[in-house]
Image (spheres, grey):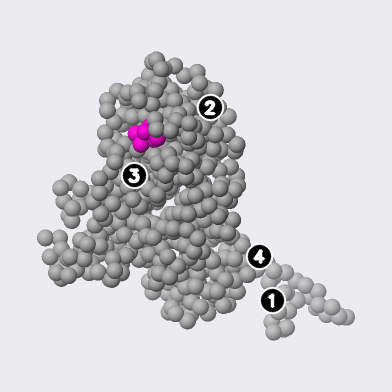
Amino acid sequence: MPLSHLSLQDRALFRQFGQGPEVPVPDPLVHHAVERQAAAAPGAVAAEHQGTTITYGELNRRADRLAARLVQEGVRPGDHVGLFVRRSIPMLVGLLGTLKAGAAYVPQDIGLTPAAQLRHVIRTAGTRIVLTQSEHTLRVPPPDTGHTGHRLITIDDDDLAGLPTEGPVHPERPVRPARPVLPDDGCYVLFTSGTTGKPNGVKVTHRNVANILLTEPGDLGIRPGDRVAQLLNIAFDMAAWEILGCLAHGGTLVVRGKDVAAAARTADVLIATPTVLSGIDPAGCPRVRTVAVAGEPCPRPLADAWARRSAFHNCCGPTETTIVNTMGHHRVDDALLTIGRPTPNNTVYVLDEHRRALPIGEVGEMWAGGDCVSAGYLDNEALNAERYAPDPFLGGGHRMFRTRDLGRWTPDGELEHLGRTDDQVKVRGFRVELDSVSSVLESVAGCSRAVTLRRDARSLISFVCPADVHPDTARRAVADVLPYYCVPGMVLPLAALPETDRGKVDRAALLRLAAQREETQREEAARPVTVHGEGAPLLPVSAVREGAA
């Protein structure tokens, strides 16, 4: 018995807290939900981008034309089709057309992704066809030697209008793949950062995606006519939440240009990382009624600022557990900012290092089970064996996924996120959780964001926003509540934190910035200056400062 070591009460709570509600999913294939919206309201606006709009009927027709072309090219269910595009309406046609053909789309932002990574994606995903826009064809690298039969298809509007079809295409008579698409077929393949420096391809199924997007609360209450901002990189799994979550429920997708805030200002629903959301002023978004954040820890001040104006969902879940597998509706007067509870048909377990269930309230590693668990990594069986395991609690052939997130259950069944296992560092021989230091810093008056990193074996360094946060005040705040070895040796105030192309804090850039600051300080300290006065010697700046002190 996997729970025999727990008390009867903890056994009951383990099941009660860790099991999301069991609910039916309206359709295991999310693109069928989009097709139903096209049939019900073909004239409704599906998306807009920089002054251009497309209706549901036209989006469905163009996607059908593309799907017919893909099927003619030999694309079959189980195949992977590259979607190497920039944010645009053709991007949506390529995504939906690939799903209609029965394949999984493999998204990459062609404007940001280096050629070496694109080649790695083509090779690992085994794509025979890559969809892109005409202006970016030269950026798509040729496949490796031996990768034969590779095709590049452009999906600009003019190109799509000329694609052949086998007779008229109607919403009620969609393109037929070579065999029926099954719930466990791939919906998309996303590449996540890998420990070896090469991204790992994660295969996410239709069952996974439909389970989060077509049930509450993952549907975010999106209804026909709602405007959903599309802010995130297509290669980031939260972009699938924006795009498919909107189109499956009949909303209008507001695809942003360069101005993130401009798209947000006209939206009813925002889905973002905390880093992206922190660059948007809530007061400038009067329409927004629902906000969901995930991808990195959310600062409490940011959550409160949006919760005062909208339904704010703090969520958690890596790509491997399909966008998010926990969601929490946060209110300003809540004692804690938690990541909520498991989403429908999903489970969360807090386990020790031996994968044994921990008593309620103890800190452990979160493992995810249920319909959120993805199909695994492409071409990496060693990593699959490390991160995926048989689920002893659900049994029946189910698998669970090791998230590497630390957490604990509150007495009322909410999950506290307590950082990452790889964010636990040793400083002066003591174990420190970096997020706990950042949380204290974010409680300092005027501090909206904080990130803490290990500087070396003896000290931490913290970065705080905005730039007028006083470093000494910040350090004293940590010293007041945490042990001395948790107090950062340096606090750097910044106007904004650098971002990765997926809208998360760029920690490597922060460390480079810190190194540059330290080098500048050393140069200033060593630079000789002239002290006015007849016969006065030249002294280094440091000596002048010491004398002045």
- Tell me if residue 506 comes above or below residue 487 in the rendering: above
Q: Residue at x 27, y 37 (%)?
A: 183
Q: Amino acid at mark 2?
A: Asp
Q: Amino acid at mark 4?
A: Thr
State whether residue 86 appears in this view.
no
Residue 197, horizontal then vertical, whole percent: 43, 48
> Residue beneath label 2, please?
156
State which region is magenta: 31-37
In primary-sequence order, the first of circles 4 and 1 is: 4
Horizontal arrangement in the rendering, residue 521 relative to residue 9 (left or right): right
Q: Which image quadrant: the N terminus?
A: bottom left
Q: Which-is-in-front pick, marks 4 and 3?
A: 3
Q: CA distance from mark 4 to mark 3?
A: 53 Å
Residue lying furthest top: 167
In primary-sequence order, the first of circles 1 and 3 is: 3
In primary-sequence order, the first of circles 4 and 3 is: 3
Q: CA distance from mark 1 to mark 3?
A: 63 Å
Q: CA distance from mark 4 to mark 1?
A: 13 Å
Q: Name the element at disc 1.
A: helix
Magenta-highlighted stretch: main secondary structure?
A: helix
Q: Which-is-in-front pick, marks 1 and 3?
A: 3
Q: Residue at x 40, y 41 (%)?
A: 249
Horizontal arrangement in the rendering, residue 134 relative to residue 196 (left or right): right
Q: CA distance from mark 2 to mark 4?
A: 49 Å
Whether tag 4 and tag 3 are in contact, CB under 8 A, the answer is no
> Residue beneath label 3, please?
214
